[in-house]
Image (spheres, rainbow, N blue to C red):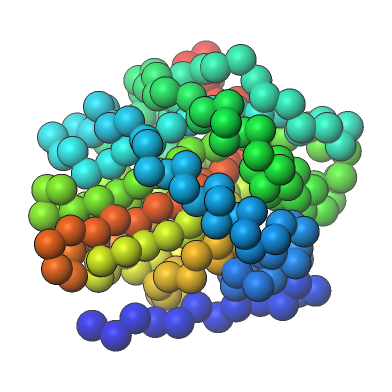
Amino acid sequence: MQELIPKYSDLRDIKTSVDKRGFCILDAASVIQWTDCPKEDLNDLSKDWNDLPIDKYLKDGGHYRSRRHSSFVFENHSLTQAPHRAHWQSVDYNALHGGIERWFEPVLASTTSKPAWYKVLYKIACIAGELHGNIATKWCIEAHQFRIDTTDGIGRPTPEGAHRDGVDFVAVFMVDRQGIKGGETRVFDANGPHGERFTLNEPWSLLLLDDTRVIHESTPIQPLYTSGYRDTLVLTLRENYFQDPKE
């Protein structure tokens, strides 16, 4: 099956694209310019996906997903790491894994101390404020390092299916993909029939979603030869509060 090339947005058109479509896609060159991260720094950050613990919460019994998770707060133009906490979603947003506290190993300090990590999170928080219409907004950010592999013969980037995350914005960085086919991204209007399909395959390209307006999913991956994987950095941003069981 032929991969569908994303319709990339110009840096000047991020807000216009999100306002019109509910999302935008940036190629790697734009991400490098936008975050002021040299390609070498992003490539160095990519190496930190090679040591992710297995996700033990998969209810389909799979062993194809590895991850780390940490939380951050952006306020008054300052980014700080929050105390380690569980990842929690309501069943309204994640029917498969919602309603339970999932404790994942934190992102390593050797990763969060890299300049590229800080720059990427800082820039995402800044654009979220612009899109939200209030640059002073406090953002609660959850950062997920994901590796989906073909250990089971097939890997599912979104085993819960098409979904929203219950936040304001979601940023999906394609960190790397090797030796696979599939993994097509699909974004749909949450309140209508419109949708787009494309494959993120360029390292450090970015999909930025308005989670209040669209739902998204990625199709399963299969190995081209003997094995393969798909690495992403997923950042979710929620105004003022993290999701927790008290909701």
User: Which residue is painted at 82% across and 53% down in the image?
Assistant: 130
Q: Is residue 238 left or right of residue 6?
A: right
User: Which residue is painted at 39% across and 66% down in the image?
Assistant: 185
Residue 21 location (% of width, % of height): 61, 70
| Front in this rendered view, residue 235 or 179 | 179
User: Which residue is painted at 83% across and 32% down in the image?
Assistant: 78
Instruction: Please indicate, yes or no, whether residue 101 appears anywhere in the rendered image.
Output: yes
User: Which residue is painted at 34% across and 56% down in the image?
Assistant: 230
Classify 77 as above or below 210.
above
Q: Is residue 201 left or right of residue 157?
A: right
Q: Determine which quarter of the picture holds residue 42.
A: bottom right
| Front in this rendered view, residue 100 or 122 | 122
Marker count (numbered): 0
Classify 30 as above or below 230.
below
Instruction: Please indicate, yes or no, whether residue 212 appears anywhere in the rendered image.
Output: no
Which quarter of the rendered picture does the N terminus lie within?
A: bottom left
Residue 120 location (% of width, % of height): 68, 49
Residue 50 location (% of width, % of height): 38, 43
Residue 95 location (% of width, % of height): 31, 36
Q: Is residue 126 left or right of residue 8?
A: right
